[in-house]
Amino acid sequence: MRKAYILFFGLALYMTSCTFDDQVDPNAPSLNSVLNNATLQELNLLVTGTEAAMRNGFGSFVTSSGSIAREFYKFDADPRNTEDLLGKNGAQLDNNTFYLTSPYNSRYRVIKNCNILLEAVENTEQVSAAEKDGYRGFANTIKSQMLLQVLSMLDDNGIRIDVADAENIGPFVNKGQAYSDILTLLDLGFSQLSGASFAFQLSSGFSGFNTPSSFGQYNRAIAAKTALYSENYTEATKVISTSFFDLNGDLSAGPKHVFSNSSGDIQNPLFKAAGQSGDQLVVHDDFINNAIAGDSRLSKFRARVATPSQDDLNGTHETALYVSSTSPIDIIRNEELILIYAEASMQNGDLADAVTAINVIRNAAGIGDYAGAVEKDALIDEILFQRSYSLWGEGHRMFDLRRYGRLNDQFLPIDRPGDIIHVRFPIPLTEGQ
């Protein structure tokens, strides 16, 4: 893996800016100073930069996986979005191009930030023991989430977990071990948050999740998702109970990535203005044709004024998921937690609980209670269907279908003869595997 350098973004929204490297900058601390008795301000700049960096590369994570899962087509000037990602004429995924390297490298840059924060906390006397645990709990939670996103992409290829020492990084571990390691790290972060205090501020995106206790609920939400993906359904139902999961609560509740038009900040990478022809996410027609009449989630799709094709592909609708370039993007929200609870309950044999959760989602969408068979196979179909509309365009469907062996032409359309469906992303060329 190429040595990961810390990236920080100067932006008013995140309070301040800085760059950490091996050069001494009179306007920003050097890496050496941060790792040796860091001040409160230096530690807090690390937190600020880490949260900001979580947004970087996320657009590519969503559009790359969403294209493979036939949620949408990305129509722009780069032919790889409709060739490589859709397996045109059997095309394989490139192990050294933007749709892999952007999300992969950006996730590991955030992990690098977290590791530096953890090391800095160990080597400073400038903060209290409770405050140190606050930094640790923050870093280990964010680090876990980034590792989960990388593992979702690479799947059976495995990932590197131990990357704290850039000159002596650990080996790739298999998928099962990686899930176990991520859950262990999340548990460690959660325990560190107990009794901790936050000497730092998070952005407005973490409003309601900006204390050790409430941030711990976010940690447990990521743990529930990790347990679900690892097919540890008992663990999923256990940890979700201490998250912000609420069957009767606001479906939109949860931490978010926030954006602005301020100088130095970034805008929502998934926002597309109405009617754009040169850069648009065109909804796969299956989502229009298979929708239940009256489903309020169809508001995520906007009829295209003009429907020019690209690369022999077309669609009648485009994304309307975000209303502006500064719309927030959910990191994880109650709606997803309810769907996690439904799936884990179903897998645990608690079918009535699964149906109860499904009905919360269905009624919120205006389509009434579930009326199908209350048995496992039928409920799998129903849960995947509800996830496909509730979480459309948010970086879930590829991994949902793969978990149930449905990432293939038996369950997904082949829109051009010769297209293939990819199951996972390759290990990047820079990893030297």
Image (cartoon, rainbow, N blue to C red):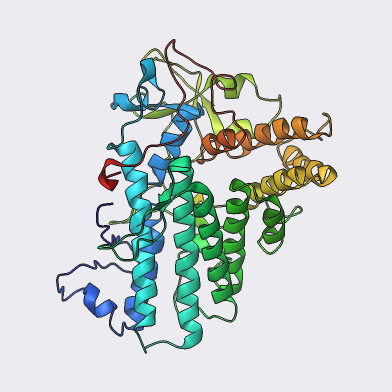
Residue beneath the point at 66% across and 24% down: 291
Question: 322 or 137, which is in the foreground?
Answer: 137
Residue 192 image offset from top left, x and y in percent: 54, 76
Above-or-below relation of 326 to 398: below
Q: Is residue 428 left or right of residue 203?
A: left
Q: In this view, does 325 lie to the left or right of 342?
A: left
Residue beneath the point at 32% across and 44% down: 102
Number of numbered tags placed on the structure image: 0
Can residue 327 be spotted in the picture?
no
Can residue 275 be spotted in the picture?
yes
Which quadrant holds residue 37? bottom left
Which quadrant holds residue 376? top right
Above-or-below relation of 144 to 315: below
Above-or-below relation of 159 to 279: below
Which quadrant holds residue 60? top left
Question: 15 or 170, which is in the foreground?
Answer: 170
Residue 378 image offset from top left, x and y in percent: 76, 30
Q: In this view, does 362 lie to the left or right of 209?
A: right
Residue beneath the point at 63% across and 48% down: 228
Residue 309 image offset from top left, x and y in percent: 39, 14
In this view, which residue lies farthest toward the top? 417
Question: 234 or 250, which is in the foreground?
Answer: 234
Question: 422 or 23, which is in the foreground?
Answer: 422
Residue 412 image offset from top left, x and y in percent: 55, 22
The C terminus appears in which quarter of the rendering?
top left
